[in-house]
């Protein structure tokens, strides 16, 4: 456990997180030339083990699980899922047993993500791809209950109504006026929540980290309907900046990450955040934002 973070049993209010996360202006010649101001919201600094949008999405789920006297959390993810890691850490800090249902077969030795999850006490179990696709069906869930006993269920990527409520708080932490807030999308839960926290006239723009991310539009709209009773209509998604697909990278992205680090002393997460930032700079250069616009980019992890 990192020093300075008290183990909490009482609840989420005693848990030391850096919220509001810092907001920092990014000074850059491209932005100046195009008349754009860009701020970054450093959610990656919220907590070393439960960073970024993962904390925001899990926070109210932790509270709900405690309220229901649940002792176990069960969730789903791919072998490199940040959500699996974060849920394992939640179990460690908040005294839950955790069960991670991983898509596909077991590969030994465990990759660093799963190795970390196991070191935080998570029990790992594997689901073949066909069953994984049906993971929300009563049959699969009943089987999981037979195997693991009662649990509080957190969906894949953590995106449920309570996750959206946590992400909705993010815009309220921003003390400046801005026009557009940007974030990377996996399941779209973060974008769906953030959009619901905006003022009239502000917009949220998501960048899909997956190839063929068009399905996210439906997912986000239906997440918003479940959480808020309707689609907020103030968001959109760019699906052309996946750089080859989920957890794929190319030289263009690697070069961008290196040059961004040289200029701004910040190494971007390549699975999500770097693709968003690459997309933002591309759109800025294409003139997609009018001169004088102020943008906020969320560094989700
Ligand atoms: C999980 C994750 C995302 C995706 O969030 P969704 O709510 O699933 O869209 C984005 N960025 C980082 C760094 C993440 O770990």
Image (spheres, rainbow, N blue to C red):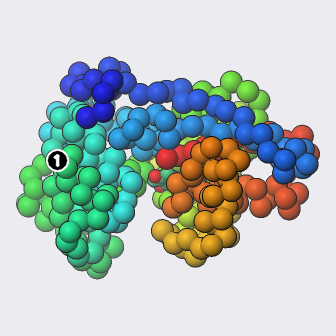
Residue 60: x and y, percent?
37, 35
In this view of the protein, which residue sits in the foreground, 186 or 220?
Answer: 186
Q: Residue furthest bottom?
A: 130
Q: Residue at x 34, y 46 (%)?
A: 86
Residue 274 visible in the displayed image: yes
Q: Residue at x 48, y 68 (%)?
A: 247
Quarter of the image with the N terminus in it: top left
Label 1 sits on residue: 121
Q: Residue at x 29, y 65 (%)?
A: 111
- Respond yes or no on whether mark 1 lies under 8 Å from ligand 1: no
Q: Residue at x 31, y 54 (%)?
A: 84
Which structural element holds mark 1? Answer: loop
| Label 1: how many Cα within 10 Å (few below 14, some 14–19, many 20+) | some
In this view of the protein, which residue sits in the foreground, 171 or 23?
Answer: 23
Judge from the rendering whether residue 270 lies leftward or rightward of residue 4; answer left or right: right
In the rendered view, would you say 267 is above or below 216?
A: above
In this view of the protein, which residue sits in the foreground, 5 or 181?
Answer: 5
In the rendered view, would you say 233 is above or below 194?
A: below
Judge from the rendering whether residue 82 lies leftward or rightward of residue 251; answer left or right: left
Residue 72: x and y, percent?
17, 44
Q: In which image quadrant can residue 236 be found? A: bottom right
Q: Residue furthest front?
A: 262
Residue 162: x and y, percent?
41, 40
Judge from the rendering whether residue 290 lies leftward or rightward of residue 274; answer left or right: right
Residue 300: x and y, percent?
53, 46
């Amino acid at each position: 456990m990192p020093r300075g973070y008290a183990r909490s049993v009482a609840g989420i209010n005693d848990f030391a997180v850096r919220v509001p996360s810092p907001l920092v202006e990014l000074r850059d010649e491209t932005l100046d030339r195009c008349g754009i101001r860009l701020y970054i919201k450093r959610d990656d600094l919220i907590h070393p083990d439960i960073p970024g949008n993962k904390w925001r999405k899990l926070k109210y789920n932790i509270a709900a699980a405690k309220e229901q006297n649940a002792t176990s959390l069960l969730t789903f993810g791919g072998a490199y899922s940040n959500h699996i890691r974060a849920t394992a850490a939640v179990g460690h800090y908040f005294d839950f047993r955790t069960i991670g249902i991983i898509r596909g077969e077991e590969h030994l030795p465990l990759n660093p993500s799963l190795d970390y999850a196991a070191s935080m006490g998570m029990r790992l179990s594997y689901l073949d791809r066909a069953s994984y696709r049906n993971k929300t069906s009563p049959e699969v869930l009943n089987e999981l209950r037979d195997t693991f006993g009662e649990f509080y269920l957190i969906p894949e990527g953590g995106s449920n109504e309570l996750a959206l409520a946590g992400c909705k708080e993010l815009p309220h932490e921003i003390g400046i006026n801005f026009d557009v807030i940007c974030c990377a999308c996996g399941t779209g839960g973060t974008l769906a929540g953030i959009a619901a926290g905006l003022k009239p006239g502000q917009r949220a723009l998501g960048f899909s980290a997956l190839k063929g991310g068009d399905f996210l539009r439906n997912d986000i709209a239906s997440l918003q309907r479940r959480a808020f009773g309707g689609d907020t209509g103030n968001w959109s998604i760019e699906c052309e900046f996946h750089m080859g697909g989920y957890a794929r990278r190319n030289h263009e992205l690697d070069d961008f990450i290196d040059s961004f680090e040289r200029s701004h002393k910040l190494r971007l997460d390549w699975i999500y955040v770097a693709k968003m930032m690459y997309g933002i700079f591309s759109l800025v250069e294409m003139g997609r934002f009018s001169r004088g616009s102020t943008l906020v980019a969320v560094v989700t992890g």
